[in-house]
Image: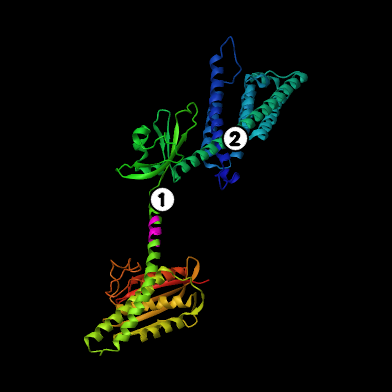
Amino acid sequence: MIFEKIYPASRYATPDDFYLKNQIQWILFLRVVLLTILLGISMLLQTKEHEIIIPPISYIAFFIVGTYLFTIFSALLLKILSRHRQFAYLQIVTDCLLTSCLVFFTGGSDSIFTIIYYFPIISAAILLFHRGALLLAALSTFSYGAILTAEFMMDKSTLLHLGIAPQTSFHVAMHSFSIRGLTFFLVAIFSFIISERLRRAEAELSKTSRDLDRLALLYKQIFDDIATGIITVDSQGRISSFNRSAGIITGYDAIDVLGKKIKKAFPELSITTDTLRPMTYLQKKRGEKIPVGYSWTRLNMPGDSENSRVYTMQDLSIIKKMEEKVRQAEKMAAIGEMAAGIAHEFRNPLAAISGAAQVLENDFAPESATGSLMNIIIRECDRLELTISQFLQFSKPATPEKCWLSILGIVQECTDLLNQGRKGEEPFTVRTVIPENLDCWADARQVKQIILNLMENAQNAMEQNGGTITVSASEIMDDGQEKILLQIADTGPGIAEKNINQIFDPFFTTRENGTGLGLAIVRQLVESHGGQVWAENSNKGDNGAVFSFTLPLP
């Protein structure tokens, strides 16, 4: 397109471009309407008694059709172009030229259509503000001056044939030119002042409207997303708004309660209580009753500030459960402390019984019935001593004293202790997959106990058929922190799915002679180091379980 080459489209359209495009469309429409009305009225009012100077009907028809076609072409071109400001200049200059032609051929400087010059000036002020208005005022003044000059210089007979009275007085022509030019510039000045004020008022109104829309959206978002349930009630006691949190707390949707009486929908929300933050048991939609803390205040609404109210509420179910857990924990802590004291007191008589049984055992032959009974007493005393020691360790864990340790060295020590304490002849081996220079930051005694407990647990799982214990360690990144990951895997039968979430609970065991404290102590020691421990069944070809735990690095 030629116009696109002259006025290349801008890459991005701005809000001012859309505003200007809309204004140009109105100017094109008003051009056609104004031209049709003025020429139509002039032709209708033309009579023999009151003759109006207008060209022949055929000339007027050509002029109107040409103006219509140009306007239609401009409207179609407006949809394609993006440089609307230059296009607006073209339109108002064209309007000025069309007006000059109409004025010249309808009586010249004395034409009744001279007033039409004001409309392009006003259009320029609306579209292009002060620059456009002053440009059109100057162009209109120049055009009117050109008409006056033509009346002086053209042949009088030709002018009379066109219905134009020739100018004979230079002073009259200058007076007419001065008055018209002055009025053109006055109209331009007043037009762009009014247009500028209107534009500023529209901009302020638009900004205020956007701010109000954003504020309304913000209030609605806060109202919907706040965790506190909010209910507003009008002067008739009917629910007027009901936010999402209130629906979650009560179980009702907003559509279920809007317009209903608050006393009928939620009779538990009383306004006669004297407490600052009353609590009640609110019945939900399905009949369940939950503890709810609520408050209310008067809602200052225009024209009605007496009876409108706003209620706020919170579900206290979780808080009540937490309070119950805290009370239970305090109770269990007291019981645990008392049990630890009792267990500690058991150690002295148990040691006395074990010592006496060992002395008496020497007085009887091992094969005798009494010797066998003494052996049972000593063995059970040792088992009770181990259980008491583990219980005391679990009830009063020691604070870890951390230092840099060689993981491979600790695993080797645990392997030696495990081999020395073997009770049966089951064939099992220990395989290590640990880099020699890998160190951890932990308490040496506690880490040794963690690994030894897990290796003993793996050995007990393979006591029937034997197998291989694999101990591996590596350095990993978890949540942006460097950690040491240790894994102890066995080739035993694995962990039953129903027990996998309970094996770290205190006193939970699947062995007849187990205490249920070994893995609980492991979890306690790992967590005291800031790490995590978990268990899972092996996903490899062999059966077995894998116990993993992490130790954070400083």
| Residue for badge 1 | 319
Nearest the viewer among 526 and 469 is 526
**On residue 184, which mark appears?**
none
Residue at 35% x, 45% y is: 290
Q: Position of residue 390 (x, y in %)?
A: 38, 73
* Horizontal side of residue 377 vs 301, given as left or right: left
Nearest the viewer among 76 and 149 is 76
Q: Amino acid at mark 2?
A: Glu
In the structure shown, which secondary structural element does the residue marked by tag 1 occupy?
A: helix
Q: CA distance from mark 2 to mark 1?
A: 50 Å
In the image, the segment drawn in magenta is 327-333
Q: Is residue 154 visible?
A: no
Toward the left, the furthest residue is 369
Q: Is residue 446 visible?
A: yes
The answer to whether 360 is drawn above or below residue 514 in the figure is: below
Residue at 34% x, 82% y is: 355
Q: Position of residue 6 (x, y in %)?
A: 60, 44
| Residue for badge 2 | 204
Q: Is residue 251 magenta?
A: no
Toward the top, the furthest residue is 49
Q: Quadrant of residue 148?
A: top right
Q: Position of residue 270 (x, y in %)?
A: 39, 35
Do the numbered discs 2 and 1 sit on residues whose CB atoms are within 8 Å? no
